[in-house]
Every structure is written in structure tokens, then in C-alpha cells.
Image (cartoon, grey):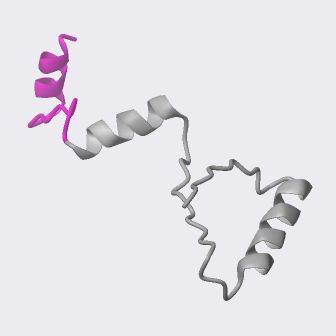
Amino acid sequence: MTTITIKINEKSTAGKVFLNFIKTFIVGKKDVEIIELEKNRYNAETENVIADIRKGKGINKAKNSADLFKQLGI
């Protein structure tokens, strides 16, 4: 088995045509499989920051604004 990774700009005309061709060509066939990978909505740096926040990394918790300013050194 061979795995090929192809990046397709699905907003372009050529990308739309290519995707439709491939999907039409392999319908009902078990020899070829399309695996759609999750698309990143943001650039890599933003995706990393979102992942850190979801893990609770870099979050400041404060009782009130005065406490927050104290933690931030303001």
C-alpha cells in the first residue's frame, strides 16, 4: 500500500474540480480511501496558544481586578 499526501486549495477552481474528480472516481471502490485531515483554522502559533489554554497553561486566576493587577505586576 502506498500513502500519498496532497494539499489542495479547495477554494480554487482547480482544487474544487480535482476533489470532485477524485471523489467521483473512487465511489464504491475499496481499493482507494480518502482520509480527510482536520484543517487548522489558524496559523501554527495561534493553534499552539489555543492548545496551551485548553491545557490550562498560562492562565491567571484572580479574585478581583486588584488581585489580577498585583499578579501581573501592574
The residue sitting at 44% across, 39% down in the picture is 47
Looking at this view, name the residue that lies furthest to the bottom. 28
Quarter of the N terminus within the rendering: bottom right
| 47 to the left or right of 4 | left
| Corner quadrant of residue 25 | bottom right
| 5 to the left or right of 16 | left
Location of residue 72 in the rendering, given as x and y in whole percent from the top left corner = 19, 17
The residue sitting at 55% across, 35% down in the picture is 43
Q: Which residues are magenta?
A: 56-74
In the displayed structure, would residue 49 be above or below residue 6? above
In the displayed structure, would residue 17 be above or below residue 57? below
Location of residue 33 in the rendering, given as x and y in whole percent from the top left corner = 59, 71
Residue toward you, 58 or 63 = 58
The residue sitting at 74% across, 75% down in the picture is 23
Looking at this view, name the residue that lies furthest to the front. 1
In the displayed structure, would residue 34 be above or below residue 28? above
Quarter of the C terminus within the rendering: top left
Residue 23 among those drawn in magenta? no
Location of residue 53 in the rendering, given as x and y in whole percent from the top left corner = 28, 40
| 13 to the left or right of 56 | right
Residue 61 among those drawn in magenta? yes
Residue toward you, 20 or 1 = 1
The residue sitting at 10% across, 26% down in the picture is 67
In the displayed structure, would residue 18 be above or below residue 67? below
Location of residue 5 in the rendering, given as x and y in whole percent from the top left corner = 62, 50
Looking at this view, name the residue that lies furthest to the right. 13
